[in-house]
């Protein structure tokens, strides 16, 4: 407890943020210095690394994320396995910076999302939304010896919110502007958008999941080419967009047309969804299929963002490194400057990991970090659970 209290009273903290995203390709770990909290937060990125998840574990995680192959026993095991894998990755980045566990004040861990049900459902007389992120923070805390904060979505969902997206809080405290209206596109497995009007306050923020990011593209690249992702967008750029397939995707996908607040995940943009779209298009070449779904990813972003007047658009997440996605987005937003995130050491690769370091800092600083205007929750509340060692 004394260790936690000493962290609570520090103005500058050394914090690690860690996550494994919906694409399940790596454990992202960032080491940062954080001064202050809330809109006074100042960040300095010290180091960042993505530690690849081996293919057997990745397949196991994906199996546990769907209804057909998952079992309670396997999810129970995976909860501890992922916690240990996160702890190992954290230890590696500490070691390579010539630090010890005692030099780190705090860890913020998102864990691994296994299932997310943002829409309220009735069961046994109770109305509930639900979500499950595994990789228990108690495992991380006790294996590293560092106070760990995790499970950031649950509190918001307990008061009627969707628990997602979380990235907009980081966008707000670090990148809101007095005179510019800014839009932020984060392209992970799912794409989420943040719109910050000039001089906005916390509950003015507009943000939501717009639709697929890399998730469908990754599925198709694995199916047709045996690779985990379309490196440098080469497959998509080698193909041609099939207009009939494109129109059919737009017809089949009801989510991207929904009004916010909204959030989604693998439960909607699964292989099952993709195969249902492709049933009538067996004659289309695989590279053209990937080109078409890549353009749809960009279009679903455009469809959702065009209604908000932006002075500039800033892209982050793994999808920002896919030239095909970037190309289509720039074509759709031809009259608006479009940039990749690169601010104070925060870039497309490390931004989400930085987010979880910041959310951990916000909780121990006593700040409520959810956004009712984003999630639809009843009120502001504290996000995360603190695991003390």
Image (spheres, rainbow, N blue to C red):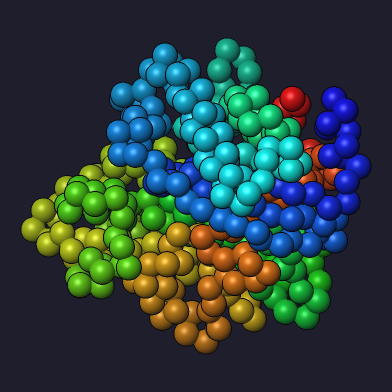
Considering depth in this image, is 178 or 258 the residue closer to the camera?
Answer: 178
Q: Quadrant of residue 284?
A: bottom left
Residue sitting at 53 percent across and 79 percent down? 338
Residue 327 visible from this viewpoint: yes
Quadrant in the rendering for residue 309: bottom right
User: Where is residue 107 drawn, in percent x and y?
Assistant: 68, 40
Quarter of the picture containing the N terminus is top right
| Name of the residue lying farthest toward the front | 98
Q: Is residue 306 above or below residue 186?
A: below
Query: Which quadrant of the structure image shows residue 91?
Result: top right
Which residue shows up at 57% across the image and 66% down it? 347
Taking the image as shown, residue 274 lies to the left or right of residue 257, namely left
Q: Nearer the viewer, residue 46 or 261?
A: 46
Point out the image quarter for the C terminus: top right
For the point 26% across and 69% down, the residue is: 234
Q: Position of residue 155 (x, y in %)?
A: 71, 33
Q: Is 369 located above or below residue 156 in the figure?
A: below
Q: Where in the figure is residue 201, as x and y percent of width and height?
A: 82, 62
Toward the bottom, the furthest residue is 335
Position of 4 relative to 204 (above/below): above
Query: Which x, y percent locates residue 96?
Result: 56, 49
- Please give the name of the residue rendered at 62% of the width and 64% of the height, measured from the top-left corner: 346
């Amino acid at each position: 407890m004394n260790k936690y209290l000493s962290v609570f009273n520090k103005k500058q903290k050394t914090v690690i943020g860690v996550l494994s995203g919906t694409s399940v390709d790596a454990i992202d770990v960032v080491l940062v210095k954080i001064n202050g909290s809330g809109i006074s937060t100042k960040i300095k990125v010290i180091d960042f690394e993505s530690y690849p998840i081996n293919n057997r574990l990745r397949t196991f995680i994906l199996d546990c994320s769907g209804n057909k192959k998952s079992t309670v026993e396997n999810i129970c095991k995976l909860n501890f396995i992922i916690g240990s894998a996160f702890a190992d990755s954290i230890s590696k980045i500490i070691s390579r910076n010539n630090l010890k566990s005692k030099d780190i004040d705090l860890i913020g861990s998102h864990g691994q999302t296994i299932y997310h049900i943002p829409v309220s459902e009735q069961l046994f007389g109770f109305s509930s939304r639900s979500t499950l992120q595994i990789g228990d923070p108690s495992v991380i805390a006790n294996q590293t010896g560092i106070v760990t904060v995790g499970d950031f979505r649950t509190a918001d969902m307990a008061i009627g919110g969707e628990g997602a997206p979380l990235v907009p809080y980081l966008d707000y405290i670090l990148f809101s502007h007095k005179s510019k209206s800014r839009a932020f596109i984060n392209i992970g497995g799912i794409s989420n958008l943040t719109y910050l009007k000039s001089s906005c306050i916390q509950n003015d923020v507009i943000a939501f999941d717009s639709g697929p990011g890399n998730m469908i593209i990754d599925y198709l690249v694995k199916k047709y080419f045996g690779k985990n992702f379309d490196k440098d967008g080469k497959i998509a750029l080698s193909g041609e967009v099939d207009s009939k397939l494109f129109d059919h995707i737009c017809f089949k996908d009801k989510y991207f047309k929904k009004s916010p607040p909204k959030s989604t995940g693998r439960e909607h943009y699964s292989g099952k969804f993709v195969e249902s779209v492709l049933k009538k298009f067996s004659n289309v070449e695989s590279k053209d299929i990937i080109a078409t779904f890549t353009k749809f990813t960009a279009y679903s972003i455009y469809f959702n963002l065009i209604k908000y007047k932006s002075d500039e658009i800033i892209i982050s997440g793994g999808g920002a490194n896919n030239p095909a996605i970037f190309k289509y987005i720039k074509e759709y937003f031809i009259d608006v400057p479009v940039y990749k995130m690169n601010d104070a050491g925060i870039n497309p690769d490390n931004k989400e990991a930085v987010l979880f370091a910041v959310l951990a800092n916000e909780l121990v600083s006593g700040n409520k970090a959810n956004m009712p205007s984003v999630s639809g929750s009843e009120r502001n509340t504290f996000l995360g659970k603190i695991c003390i060692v």
